[in-house]
Image (cartoon, rainbow, N blue to C red):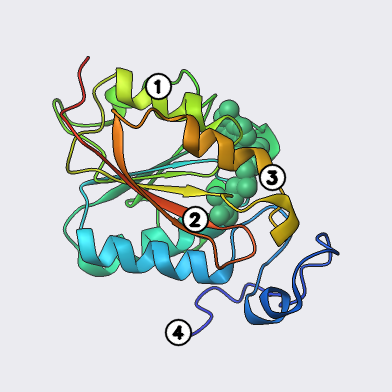
Amino acid sequence: MENFFNLKFKSNHKKNGAMREQVRTKYEMVDGMGSEREVFEFSYALCKLLKPAYVLETGTWKGHCALYICKALKEDGVGGKLITIEYDEDKFAEAKETLASQGFQDQSVCVLGDSANFDYSALMSPGSKFGLAYFDCGDREFAFKNVHDRGLVDNETIFLLHDTTIAGNGGSIGVARNEAFRIPNDIMQVKLFINVTPRGIMLGKLNKESKK
Ligand SMILES: C[S@@+](CC[C@H](N)C(=O)[O-])C[C@H]1O[C@@H](n2cnc3c(N)ncnc32)[C@H](O)[C@@H]1O
């Protein structure tokens, strides 16, 4: 897949000196905070596959993954929207500007707020749910609980969590793995950990309708 947005990827993620050699050389990252290029591409492919009306991303950072998600939504032309939330004002402004400069105003809503308590429902049509929810912020457990308790996800929603590797594998935030585990199994039944990338991902599904 071409490098759509002229992002400069580095295959050697220097922050994680202990990272296993084969992981270090196989995967590419823009910087220490964003996801791996392969996770951007996976998010793009998931959007192509699911054609969600709404995608949630918690933790916009500089908007890199958001670019890939919006590209998929735009190409599909079925009116899908990304709602992406960031609590750092500077990063929020930078990401909003980046998305606008690439012509993704219609596909994206950038929110300045805390993913643990922001109410997204005013940004969505009544009764609609997130088809894909990507948790890539701190306190993923609370970001999940927030949308679950508000009834904005259901058993059609695909959940994607980033940072699920243990620190020894090169994952920078070992605790995030615990957050993924802390989402109760009776609420999120399917938890598929794919920890081959430096930081790892988890795919999940609810096992019953979300209740308000
Ligand atoms: C790993 S970066 C996100 C990378 C981005 N998703 C990407 O793939 O390019 C995590 C971001 O989450 C933001 N963040 C952390 N906790 C948050 C919270 N509770 N609410 C909103 N944003 C949060 C941080 O400021 C940071 O920009």
In space, the residues marked 4 and 1 are separated at their CA atoms by: 34 Å
Residue named by callout 3: 173
Q: Between 86 and 130, which is closer to the camera in this rendering?
A: 130
Quarter of the figure that contains the C terminus: top left
In space, the residues marked 3 and 1 are separated at their CA atoms by: 21 Å
Q: Is residue 13 above or below residue 179?
A: below
**Amino acid type of the residue tagged 4 in the rendering:** Met
Residue named by callout 4: 1
- Picture residue at 72% right of the left edge, 75% below the top: 24
Residue named by callout 2: 201
The x, y position of residue 135, in whole percent, is: 47, 42
**Amino acid type of the residue tagged 1 in the rendering:** Asn
In space, the residues marked 3 and 2 are separated at their CA atoms by: 12 Å
**Amino acid type of the residue tagged 3 in the rendering:** Ile
Left or right side of 195 for 133: left
* First along the sequence among labels 3 and 1: 1
The x, y position of residue 150, in whole percent, is: 29, 19
The quarter of the image that holds ligand 1 is top right
Residue named by callout 1: 146
